[in-house]
Image: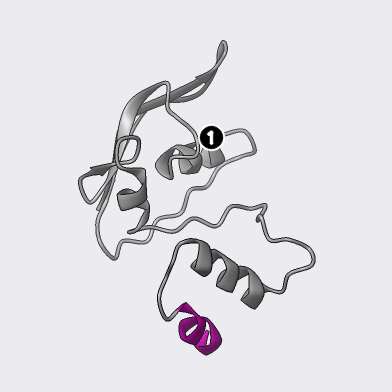
């Protein structure tokens, strides 16, 4: 379960998000839609701990994203619009490299099945 509580984000005087509250249950599918500049990417970055909120909190299975980010992220995945995939790597090599960094066991067999 993901719980977003009173999330706000300001960039200087610009208010990107204001008092966002949302709860997502296991198996629930949700889409964030809106015009450019609506705050979708900002909310996703906050939900994954890449960006700190001005105020509010996000928890994933009761793990606060700011206090226990690695545990919270072990339950979710995030693929941003602009990937960090290196131009000289094929997708398999990139996934194997990330798996190695995170010390994920048996990742190569899971990757080859995909």
x, y (%) of residue 31?
46, 54
**Residue wearing tag 1:** 39
Q: Is residue 63 left or right of residue 40?
A: left
Q: Residue at x 46, y 83 (%)?
A: 110
Q: Residue at x 50, y 19 (%)?
A: 10
x, y (%) of residue 80?
58, 52
Q: How is the structure coloured here? A: one colour
Magenta span main SS: helix
Q: Nearer the viewer, residue 80 or 35?
A: 80
Q: Is residue 33 above or below residue 98?
A: above
Q: Please identify the residue farthest to the right as the structure is shown.
A: 88
Q: Nearer the viewer, residue 42 or 28?
A: 42
Q: Is residue 81 left or right of residue 108?
A: right
Residue 53 location, quadrant: top left
Q: Over which residues does the magenta segment extend?
A: 107-114
Q: Is residue 74 above or below residue 104?
A: above
Q: Is residue 30 above or below residue 13?
A: below
Residue 77 location, quadrant: bottom left
Q: Residue at x 43, y 40 (%)?
A: 49
């Amino acid at each position: 379960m993901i719980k977003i509580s009173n999330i706000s984000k300001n960039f200087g005087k610009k208010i990107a998000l204001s008092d966002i509250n949302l709860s997502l249950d296991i198996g629930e599918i949700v889409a964030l839609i809106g015009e450019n500049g609506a705050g979708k990417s900002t909310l996703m970055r906050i939900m994954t701990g890449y960006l700190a909120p001005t105020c509010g909190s996000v928890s994933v299975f009761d793990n606060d994203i700011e206090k226990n980010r690695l545990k919270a992220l072990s339950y979710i995945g995030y693929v941003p619009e602009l990937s960090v995939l290196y131009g000289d790597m094929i997708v398999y090599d990139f996934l194997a490299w990330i798996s190695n960094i995170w010390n994920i066991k048996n990742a190569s067999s899971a990757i080859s099945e995909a």
